[in-house]
Amino acid sequence: MYKEMITEGIYSKCLSPELDNRFNHLWCLVGNTPMLELQYSYKGKVGSIYVKCENYNLTGSIKDRMALYVLYKAYMNCQISPEDVIIEATSGNTGISFSAIGKALGHQVKIIMPNWLSKERIDIIKSMGADIQLISKEEGGFLGSIQLSEKLAANGGVFLPRQFENKFNAEAHELTTGREIVAQLANIGLVPDAFVAGVGTGGTVMGVGKHLKDINPFVKIHPLEPQESPTLTTGYKVGAHRIQGISDEFIPAIVKLDELDEVLCASDGDSIIMAQKLAKQLGLAVGISSGANVIGAIKLKEQLGDAAVVVTLLCDDNKKYLSTDLVKEQPIKEGYISSDVDFTGFTPIARLEKPFFGSGK
Ligand code: PMP
């Protein structure tokens, strides 16, 4: 059925067969990522969790799924035309995804982002010919970036994906990430018991959560936030943190905390050390939010017991963080769990033979 949704595009008066083809081709490079069973010991006790390798997407992050699906739905619903400039306020990975996918579809792209994010993000966006405007703390930081995008759109000729409120953001993860998790685990005879994901827009946790709940109403769905900036639990921005991509300064409209289980937290230093360990001990060179997600998953295993099938995501790889603290030694602080974790190996769980969108890899 979902595959038909893509081909049904040719019946939308706003999506030409040529563009429809480009979408199909792009779906061969986005989603249907590998999954790994990660084996570790924590305080000397062995355990395992399941992780989706989202660094395998076109631009190396989970946000490609959202960008491609949001643009597809915009064409289907006649909310974008080929001449429109795509303008988005973002803390990084979304900007990279819209730059790549926007260009592949023939659009001009302008990205507005806070000026304190990693240099690599800025250079990658620029390399794809997108315009980039940096906003300082004094100019309003993240919220200022969003306000500016709305102001620029008022003149017309602009498509605003509005990732923080666009329902197709979460739907992208319901129809791709969530379905892939269920199908890949089903192939080895398992059903997820719990899922945890750091919240940026919340699209991942809400969308994956919805599909997992459709399959198993008892599944636990946990959002995760930085310990240094617990916006979800306090309702407002508190403190700075180093887990780029999550906890942006407010609770996004997509996030419905009453539909989710308890908010988990990970400290930024602990997340960095966990990401460093994934790279050093297993060769999985991932970003800081991936370290945070693995902390959340190991904490859940402690709560739910050895037999629980706990799933999370490696959101991106470490290449965008080589100028950040991710490559610096971190002091170990009280309460960190990374110091008691050692990774011992992983077993791959194959990609799906038939992906839910596009024509396969
Ligand atoms: N990790 C990274 C590295 C990200 O860029 C993002 C998206 N901002 C997330 C996690 C969170 O994803 P979502 O926006 O779907 O909550």
Image (cartoon, rainbow, N blue to C red):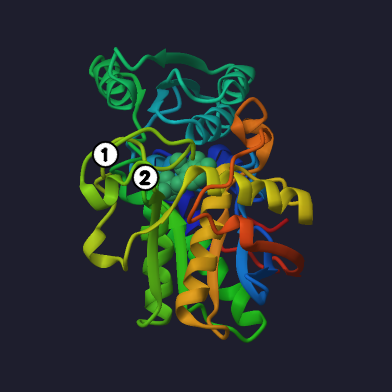
Q: How many marks?
A: 2
> Residue 52: which quarter of the image?
bottom right
Label 2 beta carbon within 8 A of ligand 1: yes
Residue at (72, 63) in percent of width and height? 343
- In the image, residue 11 lies at what x, y percent? 43, 50
Q: Is residue 111 above or below residue 187?
A: above
User: How many neighbours does mark 2 have within 10 angstroms: few (below 14), some (14-19), or many (20 or more)?
Assistant: many
Residue 250's disc number = 1
- In the image, residue 89 lies at what x, y percent? 38, 27
- In-front residue for pair 136/259: 136
Q: Is residue 121 above or below residue 340?
A: above
Q: Amino acid under label 1?
A: Phe
Residue lying furthest front:
334
Instruction: Please give the residue where the numbered disc 2 appears in the rendered image.
Output: 201
CA distance separating discs 2 and 1:
10 Å
Label 1 beta carbon within 8 A of ligand 1: no
Q: Is residue 228 above or below residue 140?
A: below
Which numbered disc, 2 or 1, marks the residue closer to the eye?
1
- In the image, residue 98 lies at what x, y percent? 50, 32
Mark 1: secondary structure: loop
- In the image, residue 193 lies at what x, y percent? 47, 79
Residue at (47, 56) in percent of width and height? 8
> Residue 282: which quarter of the image?
bottom right
Residue at (26, 66) in percent of width and height? 259
User: Which quadrant of the rendered structure holds the C terminus?
Assistant: bottom right
Q: Is residue 256 above or below residue 111?
A: below
> Residue 119: which quarter of the image?
top right
| Dot placed on the residue nearer the N-terminal end, 2 or 1 | 2
Residue 342's disc number = none
Mark 2: secondary structure: loop
Q: Amino acid under label 2?
A: Thr
Residue at (28, 50) in percent of width and height? 232
